[in-house]
Amino acid sequence: MNKAYSSLGAALLLAAAGSVVHGSPDTTAAPTRHVEQPDLPALIKRVLSPQGFLDPVYAALITTPSPYYSDAWGLQAIRDVSIEQVKRDFVPRYAQLGETTEHSVELKFPAGWTATFCTPCSIRIMDNELPISHVRISGETFRDFVPHAREFRAMLRARKLETTYLIPNPAYDAELQVARRYTPGTQATPVQADPQLERFTSAKDAVLIYPDAVHGSIEPYDRLVELLHSADYDWLALEMLPSSVQAEADTFITAPEGSAAYREAREVLLKNLWKDRFVPGTPDEENHYFKLLELMRTKHKRIIGLEGVPLEYFFFGAGEVDGAGGAARNVLWARQIPASGRGILFGGSAHFTSTWPANFQDFLAISHPQLEILSITPIKPRPMQE
């Protein structure tokens, strides 16, 4: 599966994930965690093609479904294990001891590569701190570190240490569903453009896709607000809100103004909604995305949170890579859509325009075949980057 992704969109996919704040991880319970801030440009450079795009060979290597979080550009996610346990499990039978600090230990393996365990550690990426311990796998490029990472995981599997060291992948079942789409003859699901909302208005059950080509572009946002004021619909689904706060989203719409339930739901939504992409530093209460939630409350329309993966999935689950974690997220989005009624979906255009038949609409047609799938603008597959 040759899937490529643009270099600094993919390379800085963590910049995107950096503002996909599903509630910043709470690390107050672990004050002794060491915080590492990896050199992202240096990490990402190891997986780019000479043309500056994500190397399609590397992209193919990371699209295999995994029951555990895998390695991100040579950083393998692991559970919090003690340095002493790492030594007991590997030294001296499987590796030689290298440099050791209070929070890290380097192991040197016979094949010539090294693995540096940082535990308990967090990774700081942009403005987010992920409380995920990890192993830095050596290698100049992915052609080096991918085989080393696989050897490391195979070693854990052979010694029945997978559950001790590796972190379960919350989107594994979705990744398996994605893999089933990549079979010869699988066709993409057609989406009819409906700019005047003629079909949408007359349909009993339908989804109208409103693609967000560039997160933070104000003109499409303003047009969406106009649409939300004038159209006849039952719900609004947002990429910018995680599905984990769906109960609070429902309460926010229905609870009496000023009630304790309303205040608590509002606080949760403000904490978990994307930060403002339009004017960085905008106070949460003035966040453009929160304004959409307030509009839905005034119109008594339901809000649907779409994002079904935690922030670390964007890093250790290839959550922004076309055909990999990005497609698995499409599966989870489709599962959130109500089975009946008419709704509008506002989300990144990349979730609808992949040349591979693993877009949001493909999985929506599987989970809810009764829904008519429409788009405010024509859906055009974007060209692959080689």
Image: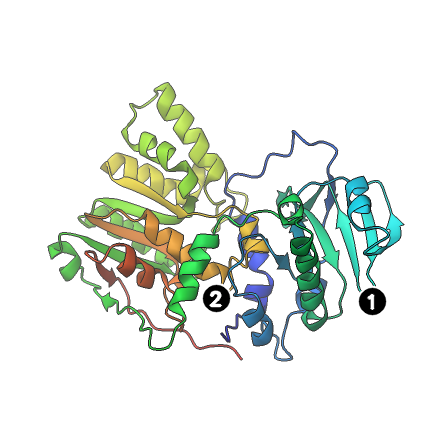
Marked residue nearer the N-terminal end (2 or 1): 1
Position of 183 compared to 105: left or right? Answer: left
Image height check: is 311 above or below 212? above
Q: Residue at x 40, y 60 (%)?
A: 177
Image height check: is 281 above or below 253? below
Amino acid at circle 2: Asp
Badge 1: few (under 14), some or many (20 or more) residues near its Cα, within 10 Å? few
Where residue 179 appears, x then y in whole percent?
43, 65
Which one is in front, 206 or 264? 206
Q: Residue 300: which quarter of the image?
A: top left
Q: Residue at x 52, y 65 (%)?
A: 63
Where residue 315 appears, x then y in whole percent?
59, 55
Q: Residue 6: which quarter of the image?
A: bottom right
Q: Is residue 303 visible?
A: yes
Which one is in front, 256 or 115? 115
Q: Which residue is mark 1?
A: 112
Where residue 122 appears, x then y in whole percent?
68, 43
Q: Which residue is mark 2?
A: 322
Give how far apart the Cα atoms at labels 2 and 1 are: 33 Å
Q: Residue at x 66, y 57 (%)?
A: 153
Q: Is residue 213 visible?
A: no
